[in-house]
């Protein structure tokens, strides 16, 4: 899944909607609803209206009233992504592209425009490119990465733990994925505030987004040149040395795909899990009481607030039927992740616990299913766990209804997550995290000022009163330490 700049779905940008008083303020052409403008300020509510009106697949209008289908049903979404003979991600077959209705200047074209990357390729080319990416991902040392995630989390918490207050989006969730992905790609020295800001700027689609993309691509192409000359054991080296023999441009474009897709998805996932922990008393009680592990909490969030709400798009290669609708050759369809996750046919009771159920659509499916989802889960699992261990008394520092999101067709991004907690001392990031104070280090080789020559040992001191032997960690604690990578 390839995230791109997020145009607003609201009314902040007048270029996306008709002028005041225009008849187009009414529901779209022929009564078809728009996914932009005033009606689309709450897309979740709009999707439920569309489900009630049309069923599992509904006609909609994108910006400039370009026609599209949105797939709302869980089963229908899975059928679409698992049927490459009927649906492709190559937008060059999309009718509005062919007839010029959706030209290069269309606001959503950065989402939809074809690129020479595995997520848009088909057939043998898809197997070649996807095989290289999957092969490089398979070389990742997951236990080592979990330890790195833990250390990076501790370092981030050290930045604000003495203040007693923090914004867990801007100071934690937006930084941890970038630090980890730079390490995985083999460019840890490139991780800094500027790289984080450039990634966020690219995704917002601001006036400086092109310059931010150039900054990121420059770092990735320099990395490609270094690893082409001097390969190491990182993801980039394995991608370059894969038998698929990717060119430097293909390597750079796929590094960008992996970096930005993983960054956006995991940033949203981290923020959403932390918000659930802080705002749902039952959730926090379950977590503290050992009834729900952090990985289970992550899966619940992937059902309720997936990192990407839709993916643009899939395109019909032939006339077919989906969800009772006639889909013509060249029609475009949105992969409806968020509406599919709340399909009443699979979740008749949205309050029901989804622990142990991974059949959500958060990572897509079929040939283009996200290949790095285990890395994203690890960043969320270990990052949330490490933060809660360091700040067990963390609380939301505003009313829940004061939280704000920036919304687009593709995703919802939490703007801030202000919290308060009792100030804590920084920890040595080279040490394993602990709820107990760290012991003072002792020299491994103490310096002796004298060399005693005693020939007999001194008398033994009186034995202290007998005490119960200290119990070591139980089996469950040992399992948790192994799971967390330390």
Image (spheres, helix red, strand yellow):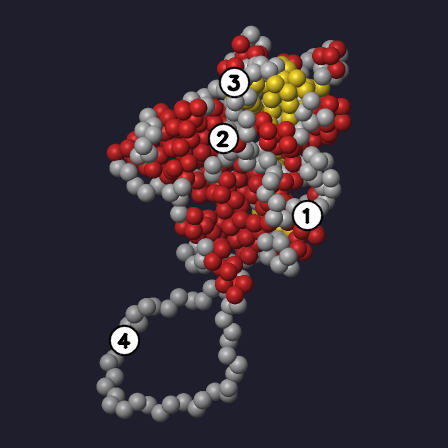
Residue 51 visible in rendering: yes
Callout in the foreground (2, 1) = 2
Going from N to C along the chain, the mark reached first, 1 or 4, is 1
The residue that label 2 is drawn on is 367
Going from N to C along the chain, the mark reached first, 3 or 1, is 3
Front residue of 470 and 373: 373
The residue that label 1 is drawn on is 353
Label 3, secondary structure: give it.
helix
* C-alpha distance separating marks 3 and 1: 38 Å
Say which residue appears at 61% left-offset and 45% top-offset. Answer: 357
Q: Residues within 10 Å of mark 1 (few under 14, many from 20)?
A: few
The residue that label 3 is drawn on is 91
Going from N to C along the chain, the mark reached first, 4 or 3, is 3
Q: Is residue 71 above or below residue 432?
A: above
| Residue 105, position as x, y percentages in the image | 54, 13
The residue that label 4 is drawn on is 448
């Amino acid at each position: 899944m390839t995230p791109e700049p997020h145009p607003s779905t609201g009314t902040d940008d007048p270029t996306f909607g008709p002028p005041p008083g225009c008849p187009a303020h009414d529901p779209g052409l022929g009564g078809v609803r728009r996914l932009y403008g005033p009606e689309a300020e709450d897309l979740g509510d709009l999707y439920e209206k569309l489900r009630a009106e049309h069923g599992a697949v509904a006609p909609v209008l994108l910006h400039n009233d370009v026609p599209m289908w949105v797939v709302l049903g869980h089963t229908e979404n899975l059928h679409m992504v698992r049927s490459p003979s009927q649906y492709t991600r190559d937008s060059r077959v999309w009718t509005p592209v062919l007839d010029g209705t959706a030209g290069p200047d269309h606001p959503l074209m950065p989402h939809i425009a074809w690129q020479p990357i595995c997520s848009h390729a088909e057939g043998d080319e898809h197997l070649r490119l996807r095989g290289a990416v999957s092969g490089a991902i398979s070389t990742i040392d997951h236990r080592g990465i979990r330890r790195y995630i833990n250390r990076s989390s501790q370092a981030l918490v050290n930045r604000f733990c003495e203040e007693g207050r923090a914004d867990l989006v801007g100071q934690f969730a937006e930084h941890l994925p970038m630090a980890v992905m730079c390490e995985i790609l083999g460019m840890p020295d490139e991780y800094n505030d500027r790289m984080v800001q450039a990634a966020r700027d690219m995704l917002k689609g601001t006036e400086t987004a092109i310059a931010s993309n150039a900054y990121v691509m420059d770092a990735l192409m320099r990395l490609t040149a270094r690893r082409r000359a001097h390969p190491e054991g990182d993801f980039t080296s394995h991608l370059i040395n894969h038998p698929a023999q990717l060119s430097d441009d293909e390597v750079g474009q796929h590094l960008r795909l992996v970096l930005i897709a993983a960054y956006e998805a995991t940033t949203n996932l981290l923020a959403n899990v932390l918000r659930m922990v802080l705002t749902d008393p039952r959730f926090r009680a379950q977590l503290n009481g050992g009834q729900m592990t952090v990985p289970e909490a992550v899966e619940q969030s992937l059902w309720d607030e997936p990192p990407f709400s839709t993916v643009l798009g899939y395109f019909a290669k032939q006339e077919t039927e989906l969800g009772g609708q006639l889909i013509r050759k060249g029609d475009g369809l949105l992969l409806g992740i968020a509406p599919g996750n709340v399909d009443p046919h699979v979740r008749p009771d949205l309050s029901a616990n989804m622990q142990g159920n991974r059949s959500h659509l958060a990572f897509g499916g079929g040939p283009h299913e996200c290949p790095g989802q285990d890395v994203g889960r690890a960043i969320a699992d270990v990052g949330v766990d490490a933060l809660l261990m360091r700040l067990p008394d963390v609380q939301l520092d505003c009313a829940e209804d004061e939280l704000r999101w920036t919304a687009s067709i593709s995703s919802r991004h939490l703007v801030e997550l202000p919290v308060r907690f009792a100030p804590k001392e920084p920890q040595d990031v080279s040490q394993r995290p602990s709820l107990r104070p760290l012991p003072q280090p002792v020299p491994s080789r103490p310096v002796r000022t004298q060399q005693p020559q005693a020939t007999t040992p001194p008398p033994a001191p009186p034995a202290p009163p007998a005490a119960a032997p200290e119990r070591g960690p139980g089996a469950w604690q040992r399992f948790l330490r192994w799971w967390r990578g330390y």
